[in-house]
Amino acid sequence: MSQAKLTALLISIGAGAALAGCCGGGPSHKCDFTPPTVQMDAGGSDAAMPCGTEVCQAPQVCCLKKIAPFASCIDPANYVADACEMIQMNPPPCTMPADCDGGTVCCLENATETISCQPPPLCPGDATHSYLICASDMDCPNQQAGSCRSVDTGTTGVSIGVCAP
């Protein structure tokens, strides 16, 4: 994805980030922008679903594992037999790595144009399928100086850090 496309994507996401000041309530003060009618069963969607570096086409589902291959598209009938981990259907939104817990990473997914906490296999940060969101170089896999780059989201004045691939 070119810098111009990334900037355009982040501009659209920036509008949502601008609304962050309006969110709150409850002890977490976190926003939930997920649509109220998300279907919870594996066969409930005909849309393509990002799965690591693959994109699963219906009726396939994403199989996450703690050992390689970490994410792959499989037939739903093989989900239990392949010992797949359960995927969180409504991952919490995030704006920085500190917003995520349980071993998840803050991820900008290109296919869905969302920023949310995802298991690392679903967010390779390859700049083709996804970007890892970072607050400093230490949040990036290589932890080298300059690896966390700030990208301006445009008119909102909000900038976000992404790890360089």
Image (spheres, rainbow, N blue to C red):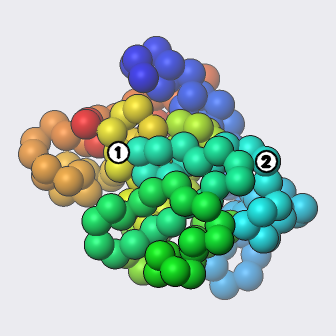
- Left or right of 16? Residue 138 is left
- Could you say which disc has been placed on residue 54 in the image? none
Which residue in the rendered view is the most extreme toward the right? Answer: 37
Residue 137: x percent and y percent?
19, 49
Q: Amino acid at mark 1?
A: Gly
Residue 112: x percent and y percent?
63, 42
Which residue in the rendered view is the most extreme toward the bottom? Answer: 27
Q: Can residue 26 be spotted in the picture? A: yes
Is label 1 in a helix, a strand or a loop? Answer: loop
Foreground: disc 2 or disc 1: 2
Q: Image height check: is 86 above or below 45?
A: below
Q: Image height check: is 44 above or below 131?
A: below
The residue identified by callout 2 is 46
Q: Residue at (9%, 45%) from the top-left corner?
A: 144
Question: Which quarter of the image is occupied by the C terminus?
Answer: top left
Q: Residue at (29%, 72%) from the top-left corner?
A: 67
CA gap between label 2 and label 1 equals: 25 Å
Question: Which quarter of the image is occupied by the N terminus?
Answer: top left
Q: Image height check: is 69 above or below 57?
A: below
Q: Image height check: is 53 above or below 84?
A: above
130 or 32: nearer the eye?
130
- Left or right of 158? Residue 34 is right
The residue identified by callout 1 is 125
Q: Residue at (40%, 72%) from the top-left corner?
A: 65
Residue 141: x percent and y percent?
20, 53
Q: Amino acid at mark 2?
A: Asp
Q: Residue at (57%, 72%) from the top-left corner?
A: 78
